[in-house]
Image: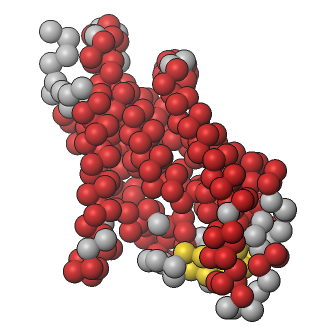
Amino acid sequence: MFFHQLHNELWKLFGKKRTYIGFGMFLLVQNAMLFGFHFSKGFRRLYESALAGNGYLVDDYISALTVALIMLLPQIVLLIPLYTGLIGGDLVAKEAEDGTLRMILCRPISRWRLLFVKWVAGVIFSASLVIALGGMALLFAKMWFPWQGLFVFFPEPEHIFAVLPAGEGLKLYAISHVFLAINASTMMTIAFMFGCFNMKPAAATILAISFLFLNLVLESIPALADYRPYMLLYHFRSWMLVYGQPIDWARIITALSVLGAFNVTCLVIGGTAFHVRDIKS
C-alpha cells in the first residue's frame, strides 16, 4: 500500500505544470550562461590567472566539466532553494487550501503516514531536479567546450584548488550531486514543515527561503565567523569538499549527520503541527 500511495503522490506531483518550472528555467539560464562564457574574455582571464599562477595551461582545463561546475554555483544558491521550496510548500498546504485533504483523511490512513508519503515524493522530486541540473549543465557545456580535465577553484570560504583528469573529475562531479540532492531535500523539508501549519502555500515557501537567506546573511558577517559551524549553509557546502585534495571525509560525515538530524527535526515539528490541526471539520 505504501508504494501504491507513493505512486499516486508522484502522479499528482508530476502531473502539475508548475512542477516543471524549475526544469525549464535551468534550460534557459544554463544556455544564457554558456553563451556568455563562450564569448567573454573576462571569464577566460579570471581562470587563466589562477591556472597560470600555479603552473598550468589554461587550454587544458577550460573544459566542459569545468564550465558545468562553474554554472552550478549561482543556480544552487538562487534557483534550487526557490523551486524545492515551491514544491515543499505545496505538498500539504495546497491540498489543505483546495479542500482535498478532507477527502483523503476520510480514508483509513494515519496522518503521519500521509505526511511521510508526501515527504518521500518531495525528496524524489528534489533529487530529480538536481540530476536534471547537473546533467543539463554537462550536456550543454559539452556542446560549447572540449572534453578535458576538470579545474576546481572555490576561493571562499572553502579554499579549494584542484586540477583533475577528465575521468576522475567526472566521478567527483557525479558524487557531488549526491550531496547536492541531500541539500535540495533539506530545503524542501523546511518548506514542507511550514506547509504543515495552517498557512497558505506561498507563505510556507517564503518562510523557507527567508530562513535559508537568513543563514546566508548571518554567515557573511565577519564577527560571526566562529559560529559558522552552527549554521545550516556551512553543512550544505559538503558537496564542495568532494573536490578537495585530500577529501575531508570527517567534515562530510559530520555535515551529513547534522543535515539528517535537521530533516528529522523538521518532520517531527511539521508532523506534530499537522496532527493537531482540525482539517476535517
Q: Which residue is drawn at 42% across and 47% down?
A: 81
Q: Residue at x 60, y 70 (%)?
A: 242
Image position of 174 (left or right of 29): right
Image position of 52 (left or right of 122): right
Residue nearer the viewer, 153 or 238: 153
The correct choice, above or below, for 138 with respect to 229 in the image is: above
Q: Where is residue 10 in the image (x, y as percent from the top left)?
A: 53, 24
Image position of 265 (left or right of 164): left
Q: Which residue is drawn at 75% across and 54% down?
A: 141
Q: Which residue is drawn at 25% across and 42% down?
A: 207
Q: Position of residue 144 (x, y in %)?
A: 79, 54
Residue nearer the viewer, 247 or 19: 19
The correct choice, above or below, for 123 with respect to 21 in the image is: below
Image position of 234 (left or right of 80): left
Q: Position of residue 7 (x, y in %)?
A: 55, 22
Q: Position of residue 80 (x, y in %)?
A: 48, 46
The correct choice, above or below, for 249 with respect to 212 in the image is: below
Query: In the rendered image, which quarter is residue 84 located in?
Result: top left
Residue nearer the viewer, 38 or 151: 38
